[in-house]
Amino acid sequence: MDPSGAVSPPAAAAVTALRDRGWTLATAESLTAGLLAATVAEVPGASAVLRGGLVVYATDLKHELAGVPTEVLERHGAVSPETARALARGAALRCGADVGVGLTGVAGPEPQEGRPVGTVHVGLTVPGMEPWSVPLALTGDRSRIRTAACAAALELVIAAATGEGTGDDDDGNESGS
């Protein structure tokens, strides 16, 4: 929901696209701390597609709740494309959803793991494809970075549900490679 109290147009479009496709959605959110799931839940009819979400703000919860392998966290860190993809996979598996979204990044005010404020990775998994991730370099304060990360995730969900998603990952490789 935006500050005026209106439902987010991208969230409404995502709910419609998911419903039309017959897909359900789950999230595993770090830097957004449930904001994406809450934004989707504001849409009338969201219960037809939103299965649930995991707030995995602490690194250990990324493993314990979302099933991110310890090796991924140790080798790549909490803020990485690999972790975003694992979060997406974990959200879908743990919540029994068709589509999983993983959000991880640095909202500030300080860098984390040597990554600058505004570094965000959005992971996505959909039926029939390996999880992929998209890197974002966002600007603004914490609130703006978190809101922009949610908006980007919604656009990816819409693109995937309507068949317009590319499945390209951070490395420029097709998913599944």
Image: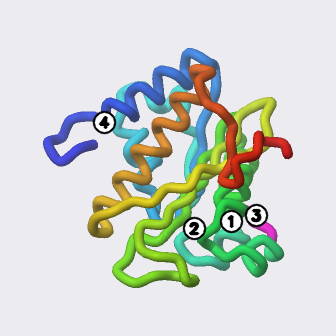
Q: Is 23 above or below relative to 121?
A: above
Tag 3: amino acid:
Gly
Query: Of the residues under marks 3 and 4, which one precedes in the sequence?
Result: 4
Residue 91: x percent and y percent?
Answer: 67, 51
Residue tagged by mark 2?
A: 56
Residue at 42% from the left image edge and 49% from the top image edge = 150
Query: Of the residues under marks 1 and 2, which one precedes in the sequence?
Result: 2
Q: Secondary structure at mark 4?
A: loop
10 Å crowding of disc 4: few (<14), some (14-19), many (20+): some
> Disc 1 versus disc 2: distance between alpha carbons?
7 Å
Left/right placement of residue 137 relative to residue 63 reads left
Which is closer to the viewer, label 4 or label 2? 4
Q: Is 111 above or below relative to 157?
A: below
Query: Of the residues under marks 4 and 2, which one precedes in the sequence?
Result: 4
Residue tagged by mark 4?
A: 8
Residue 67 is covered by the magenta coloring: yes
Residue tagged by mark 3?
A: 67
> Disc 2 versus disc 3: distance between alpha carbons?
10 Å
Task: State the extent of the magenta-drawn residues as a range.
Answer: 65-69
Query: Of the residues under marks 1 and 4, which one precedes in the sequence?
Result: 4
